[in-house]
Image: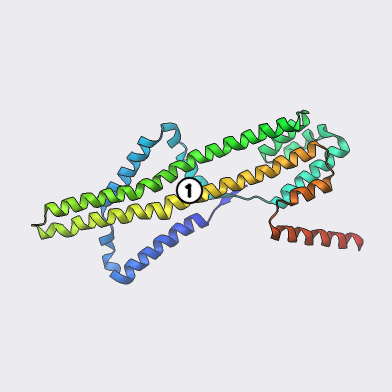
Amino acid sequence: MKKLDYFTPIGIFVGLTMILFAIFFNAGAGNFHFFVQWTSIVIVLGGLSAAIMINFTKQDLALLPKVFKEAFHARDYDLSNLISTFKDLSTKARREGLLSLEMGLEEVDDPFIEKGVLLAVDGIEQETIKDILMAEVVAMEERHRKGRYIIEKAGEYAPAWGMIGTLVGLVLMLQNLNDPATLGPNMAIALLTTLYGTLLANLVFLPMANKLANKTEEEVFIKQIIIEGILGVQSGQNPKVLEEKLSAFLPKKAKVKEEEVKEGEAAYDQA
């Protein structure tokens, strides 16, 4: 299940707030307008957009809205519930046979688990099932990599376009040294384009790309657990053995919590 990832907007907000606070603390509220230079904004955003369009195809750029949306959302993975799901599937398969699993798939809300179980029910060999599911994992990684690559490139290009804007401002300033009134605005273009480009890269694009990479790694990890669970169910592993095997993927804290739950259940049964 997806939920809003609050840390992405909060991180961007905190970064901007700290910069604005530094400006206010040193220059006062009345001087904020000195840090808004529309020529610099046009150079950075216009040049960045042009570079991205040259670098990627129309099909690639169509992924951008979904990629940005993904950076602001997180999947809620409950490993304990996932392990319990496979324990229940294994118990049912041992009692009623693999074919019985097909009847209860409407309760499973993960298409990857559903696909794996259906392959197991069809009697496909374990190596083949693993190859099919791993191919889907690889395809998912490639889709994520392609979307993330656009964000990474934007993070590379933004400071470069900031530097280009700086050069434009310096050229304009040097051409008008005899006119003191133009020195300030041209110097502002020179400095603020670098600020805007660096800010976009290091506060938005590069952190966002890294977050997307971490999310991909997490999703691959979850799918590896699912593959192990499906293969265990198909091979008829004892539900307790399968549970212990999949529990090896749990973080240490989650393992301790799970052990406490088991001890509590055991104490309740004895009572």
Q: Looking at the figure, which quarter contains the C terminus?
A: bottom right
Q: Nearer the viewer, residue 86 or 127?
A: 127
Q: Secondary structure at mark 1?
A: helix
- In the rendered image, residue 25, in percent from the top left (x then y), is placed at 33, 71
* Number of disc labels: 1
Give me the residue at 42% from left, 52% from top: 204
Give me the residue at 38% from left, 52% from top: 200
Q: Amino acid at mark 1?
A: Ala
Query: How does the figure colour the protein chain or chains?
Result: rainbow
Q: Is residue 6 left or right of residue 93?
A: left
Q: Is residue 12 left or right of residue 117?
A: left
Residue 101 seen? yes
- In the rendered image, residue 41, in percent from the top left (x then y), is placed at 29, 50
Q: Nearer the viewer, residue 11 or 229?
A: 229
- In the rendered image, residue 254, in percent from the top left (x then y), is placed at 71, 58
- Position of residue 239 relative to residue 32, above or below, is above
> Residue 26's image quarter?
bottom left
> Residue 225's image quarter?
top right
Residue under circle 1? 209
